[in-house]
Image (cartoon, grey):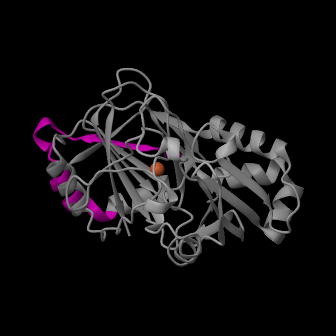
Amino acid sequence: MGFTEGSLAEAKLIGDDVFPKTFLPAAVSERNLAKSVLAERESLVAALRRHRALLFRGFDVISVDDFERVVEAFEWDAFQVISGTTTRSKLSERIYTANEASVDLFINFHHEMSLRPTVPSKIFFCCSEPSPEGGETSIVASDVIVEKMEERLPEFMAKVADVGIIHGNKTATNAEVGTQAIFNKSWMSYLGTDDEAEAVKRAKENFSCSTVHFFSDGSAELIFGPSNPVVEREGKRAWIIPILGYTDNINMASNKFGDGSAFPLEVLGIYEQLLEENCVDIKWQKGDILLLDNFAVQHARRPGKPPRRVLACMCK
Ligand SMILES: [Fe+2]
């Protein structure tokens, strides 16, 4: 047995299931995580389904190669990463930097690439260098958020199930292109054209947008939906539309009901409060690997300090 169960001070209980479930090496001689994963793959996959998130701590995961070997031991196919509106660097066949936006910026809760036509089912994070202060990756069970939204806002939830949400996300302005802002790519580079009509066509085909609005500051707003923010995958419901946007600037995102009527502003406050009440901030240690069921768990990045460095890998 390569693992022993750890207890994480910040973990929460969802029913009887600890979130996240933490695994430590069973012995000093068993710190080769890839080897232990190969030996116990099936039980780990079952644990991920039940607990939604798994944290592996105390193993010898030093290099990008070590991380890649762990990922490969799970035997899931690689998710083809298509360039988006943020910057990541490719470090190896399957490993990327998580996000190169300035580490002092908050990245709000989201399922990875949840509005794309194809969504990664799992995401791994590996802490290469923890932040000296802050910089936690925060995770929340999306099914819990759906359930609590239904309790708090039954009429709103009935309406979104009926007519859906039209959601907009802003891309970088000319002034933000190439900076360390969370969105630092122009729509021209994101969509590979400077022709607006062609950009709309590509946004629809490749990114499931319903349309794109263009602004004089060089930014664009990618419009999604109308669609239901709640989807059910593999038996768990998830809230997949990031209604608060990906940053702490609420003006970067827009929402209205699918019938065109205005979105009640208090919904955003309640949604944000539920995220904060139910999330777990993972205080990274060097070499930690966090595995998330991306259909079940939303993640966020708390503001930190350099040299925080977290790597990521997505699977089909
Ligand atoms: Fe993310």
Residue 117 lies, with reference to residue 124, above or below; the image says below
On screen, 236 above or below 52? below
**Residue situated furthest top in the rendering:** 133
- The answer to which image quadrant residue 21 occupies is top left
Q: Does the magenta stretch include residue 24?
A: yes
x, y percentage for residue 244? Answer: 67, 46
Quadrant of res 210? bottom right
Looking at the picture, tell me which residue is in the foreground, 184 or 149: 184
Residue 82 screen position, x and y as percent: 39, 66
Please name the residue shown 85% across and 63% down the image: 158
Would you identify the image quadrant in which residue 99 lies?
Answer: top left
Give the residue drawn at x 34%, y 26%.
306
Query: Which residue is more in the foreground, 9 or 1?
Result: 9
Left or right placement of residue 178 versus residue 11 in this view: left
User: What's drawn in magenta, residue-wise?
Assistant: 17-42
Q: In this view, does 129 lie to the left or right of 10?
A: left
Question: Which x, y percent locates residue 226?
Answer: 74, 70
Residues 222 and 220: in front is 220
Q: Is residue 117 left or right of residue 274?
A: left
